[in-house]
Image (spheres, rainbow, N blue to C red):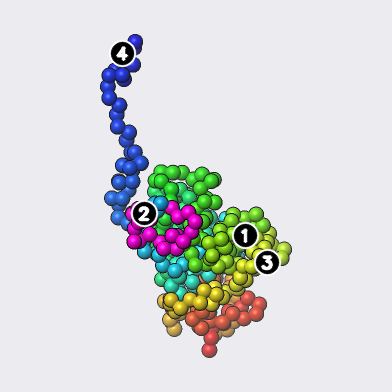
Amino acid sequence: MPASVARAIVQPPKPVANSQLELTLQWLQRPGNAVLTLADAAYPPLLLEIADPPLLLYVRGRAELLSRPGVAIIGSRNASAQGMQNAAAFAQALSMAGLTIISGLALGIDTHAHEGGLRGAGATVAVIGTGADLVYPRRNLDLAQRIAEQGCIVSEYALGLPAMPANFPRRNRLISGLARGVLVIEAAAQSGSLITARLAGEQGRDVYALPGSIHATLAKGCHALIKQGAKLVESADDVLQELQWLGGVPQVPPAVEDEAPLLAALGHDPLDADTLAARSGLAMGVLMGELLALELAGRVERLPGGLFQRCK
């Protein structure tokens, strides 16, 4: 018998390093990390209503956001520029009204929904399909860090579990389960967002859909949802009215002060968004979000032809 084999037989096995328990205990030592069980008072009450609530939730950030009223905003990963602008604008307006924005940290609509949510008081929750110690996709690493600091990241999957295709349809039930309503911004006819919308209906949640051109592939899923009974919405106000939301009044951001840079750039004559973006130096997604906030605050009005004008 070789000496190496003999030593292996007589020596006790080494303890497995970084076992799941050890990994979790180490992770819990970091500020902002927590594990919630079904028995915890902080466990989100809306998840207790769904058919199969997770036994454990791994949380990074503000766990209290999981129990606050929220709206899920979802849609295509390959969204159009307008769709991403709409996601950011709706999310910012709803977050400013005090609603938490819930989405899945995917590229496209999810990314811009989280960005908009972070710009309001309601903040944002990212429900992910990997372990809470991982970020997928890696392109959203910076966004995930900001969500962990200002909002909340949550997963039902064990730490270290990588992205696997089967994880994401299952995590969708948590996106809808945490929300009072689900807004679909853009979705193709076979989009995964339709799975979330179906789950929302089964969970008794409201489903809203933003319509688009009859010629647009990414509008077909939304149109199908509307045909099936989803509520057609054209503005954040529509969502607030459908929810009968009385929990907060839209907050006026710094941009709506009398001497705000955006209002100064707008002046007193009608302007289109491209000209206003050039004048203000704002990225189009940010610009549209601020314009919507100003519109909700009664400081700017939207005119025919895609023009904006300061209210008298």
Residue at image point 43% right, 77% down:
248
Query: Residue beneath label 3, please?
Result: 227
Q: Which is more N-terminal, label 2 or label 4? A: 4
User: Quick check: can you spot residue 192?
Assistant: yes
| Mark 4 and mark 1 residues within 8 Å of each other at the beta carbon | no
Residue 42 to residue 303: above or below: above
Q: Which is more N-terminal, label 1 or label 4? A: 4
Q: Which mark is residue 37?
A: 2
Q: Which mark is residue 63?
A: none
Q: Which is more N-terminal, label 3 or label 1? A: 1
Query: Residue beneath label 4, please?
Result: 3
Distance, label 4 to label 1, CA atoms, is 64 Å
SS of the residue under disc 3:
helix
SS of the residue under disc 1:
loop
Whether residue 46 appears in magenta in the rendering, the answer is yes
For disc 2, the neighbor class at 10 Å (few under 14, some 14 to 19, many from 20) is some
On the image, the x and y values in percent for residue 104 come to 50, 56
Q: Which is more N-terminal, label 3 or label 2? A: 2
Query: Residue beneath label 1, please?
Result: 187
In what quadrant of the picture does the N terminus appear?
top left
